[in-house]
Image (spheres, rainbow, N blue to C red):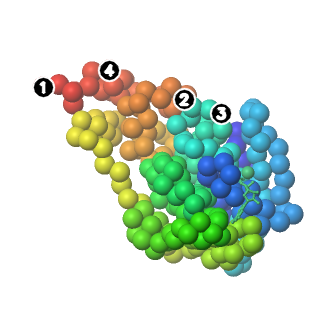
Amino acid sequence: MLKSKEDLNQEIDWIVALAGNPNTGKSTVFNALTGLNQHTGNWPGKTVLKAEGTYAYGGYNYLLIDLPGTYSLFANSLEEQVARDYICFEQPDVSLIVTDATCLARHLNLVLQVLEITDKVVVCVNLLDEATRKGIQVNLEALSCELGVPVVGTTARDGVGLEELKETIALVAQRVICPQPRVISYDREIEGAIAELLPHLNVEAYPNLNKRWLALRLLEGDPSIFDYIKTPEAINEVLVKPVWAEG
Ligand SMILES: Nc1nc2c(ncn2[C@@H]2O[C@H](COP(=O)(O)OP(=O)(O)O)[C@@H](O)[C@H]2O)c(=O)[nH]1
Ligand SMILES: [Mg+2]
């Protein structure tokens, strides 16, 4: 079992998961925020390194979980599955996604995948110094409008932007800011299939699980998701005999 808020020291108020592609400065952000208040081990039952640490801000204590660096959340590797399962099933209060300002487009893939799971997201555009050096300017406000979630620019190695980052995490954790992520719509066939599945998805063990996301994974036939849910016959029927594909 992964740690949940109840298992931890009661002094923790909010849990923040740190996601991002490898080499975006995730560990740099993690170290800058938690300092010496961290420890590492393995994810339970997995040979994947887990780092967690705490920091205090604005009268609250935060537990920061450094998820494995991944390019996607498709559960193709152990790392991806650990990251995905944490965001999905442990439901941290905030998911902070660290991206690289010098090649932002490539990083938005992961961002959009996280936005399909949760709305409690802050996007950190790191390596702004490198971007400036390369003549790249990132319009953080426009990006935030497009994504529907707060975006903070940082140069984590120099500690630039970290106060704003902590403040934004605090506002999302406390639901002062309620992000409204852009919803990705798929073509008619897939949207029809999602609509067909949704009424059947009552996953008792995970009442807050994002049903639209779950429907998409079921349609993909993602085997890793079947470990978590008992598939009611009704769903099987929809999946095996796709009514939306008829006619
Ligand atoms: N120039 C610059 N380098 C950074 C910044 N943040 C992190 N780095 C460097 O980028 C490299 C990868 O950082 P790391 O935190 O290990 O990335 P991770 O793989 O995402 O955990 C390290 O050499 C960091 O010192 C930044 O804002 N600017
Ligand atoms: Mg790292």
Mark positioned earlier in the residue sequence (4 or 3): 3
Q: What element does badge 3 sit on? A: helix
Mark positioned earlier in the residue sequence (2 or 4): 2
Residues at marks 4 and 3, CA–CA distance in whole angstroms: 28 Å
Residues at marks 1 and 4, CA–CA distance in whole angstroms: 16 Å
115 on left or right of 34: left
Q: Does any atom of ligand 2 lie closer than 8 Å to the CB of label 2?
A: no
Q: What element does badge 4 sit on? A: helix
For the question of whether residue 87 can be seen, the reply is yes
Amino acid type at mark 2 = Ser
Of the two numbered discs 3 and 2 in the rendering, the one whose residue sits closer to the viewer: 3
Whether residues under marks 1 and 4 lie with C-beta atoms below 8 angstroms apart, the answer is no
Label 2 crowd bin: few (<14), some (14–19), many (20+), radius 10 Å? some
Q: Residue furthest top?
A: 240
Ligand 1, seen in the image, is in the quarter at: bottom right
- The residue at 76%/46% (across/down) is 50
Q: Which residue is mark 1?
A: 247
221 on left or right of 46: left
Amino acid type at mark 3 = Leu
Q: Nearer the viewer, residue 177 or 189?
A: 189
Label 3 crowd bin: few (<14), some (14–19), many (20+), radius 10 Å? some
Residues at marks 2 and 1, CA–CA distance in whole angstroms: 31 Å
Q: Give the percent coordinates (x, y) of residue 246.
A: 17, 25
Image mark for residue 240: 4
Q: Which residue is mark 2?
A: 224
Q: What element does badge 2 sit on? A: helix
Q: Which residue is mark 3?
A: 78
Q: Does any atom of ligand 1 lie closer than 8 Å to the CB of label 4?
A: no
Amino acid type at mark 4 = Val
Residues at marks 2 and 4, CA–CA distance in whole angstroms: 18 Å
Decide: is 141 above or below 30. below
